[in-house]
Image: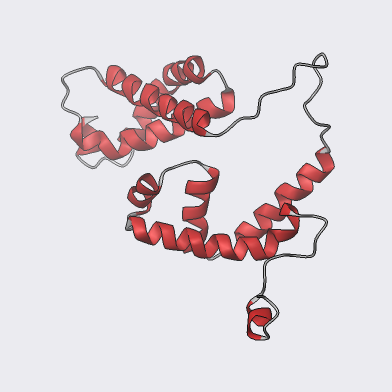
Amino acid sequence: MAAHAAGDPHAFSELVRRHRDRMWAVALRTVRDPEEAADALQDAFISAYRAAGNFRAESQVTTWLHRIVVNACLDRIRRRQARPTVPLPETGFNEPASPRDSISERETKLMVQAALDELPENQRAPIVLVDVEGYSVAETAKLLGIAEGTVKSRCARGRGKLAKVLGHLRNPDAIANVPTHESKRDGEGR
């Protein structure tokens, strides 16, 4: 840890190599989902990398990393719980609440990803962090190093662009219900 804080470019990689298996086990036991555990572990190692200069050696590096990993896992659990859920109906044994169309779901994911890819980076990053990853506006502002108001305005502009491109997904039976810039000028969008 001291070597990393002193500027050794390989020291943190060695620290990760030494502790990743143990920290992976901690993350997996905490969140009980391999994908969430992998994401939490990545978040934790990024946090540890950034906070390495603040390590005071009052505890072992393993203890310090353990705490960071657990906190990253708890953050992911809190974010997941904050997302609204729909209760399953009590009828039917092991039946999904509604039939799923996996091809349609895959097409929708591809359309959303393509629409996100069309956004400028300064709008895409805040939208992904807030709307997809579940970070708060304040957290997103800190992560991106911009003001909270900037996060809000970039999200609003990006959401407007996404609504135009993806409006048909919201109401598939209607023609895109978001007026275009041209239709507003022509008086059609009122």
Residue 48, percent from left and from top: 32, 33
Say left or right for 167 vs 161.
right
Residue 134, percent from left and from top: 49, 41
- Quadrant in the picture for the N terminus: top left
Return the residue nearer the eye: 181 or 158. Answer: 181
Q: Can residue 18 be seen in the rendering of this structure?
A: no
Residue 32, percent from left and from top: 55, 17
Figure quadrant of residue 73: top left
Return the residue nearer the eye: 127 or 82. Answer: 82
- The answer to whether residue 77 is above or below residue 47 is above
Q: Residue at x 32, y 21 (%)?
A: 67
- Quadrant in the picture for the C terminus: bottom right
Q: Residue at x 34, y 55 (%)?
A: 148
Considering every residue shown, the one lying at the far front of the view is: 190
Return the residue nearer the eye: 131 or 47. Answer: 131
Q: Residue at x 38, y 32 (%)?
A: 45
- The answer to whether residue 165 is above or below residue 181 is above
Considering every residue shown, the one lying at the far bottom of the view is: 186
Q: Residue at x 67, y 75 (%)?
A: 189
Figure quadrant of residue 161: bottom right
Q: How did the renderer colour the structure?
A: secondary structure
Q: Can residue 107 be seen in the rendering of this structure?
A: yes
Q: How many marks?
A: 0
Say left or right for 109 vs 132.
right
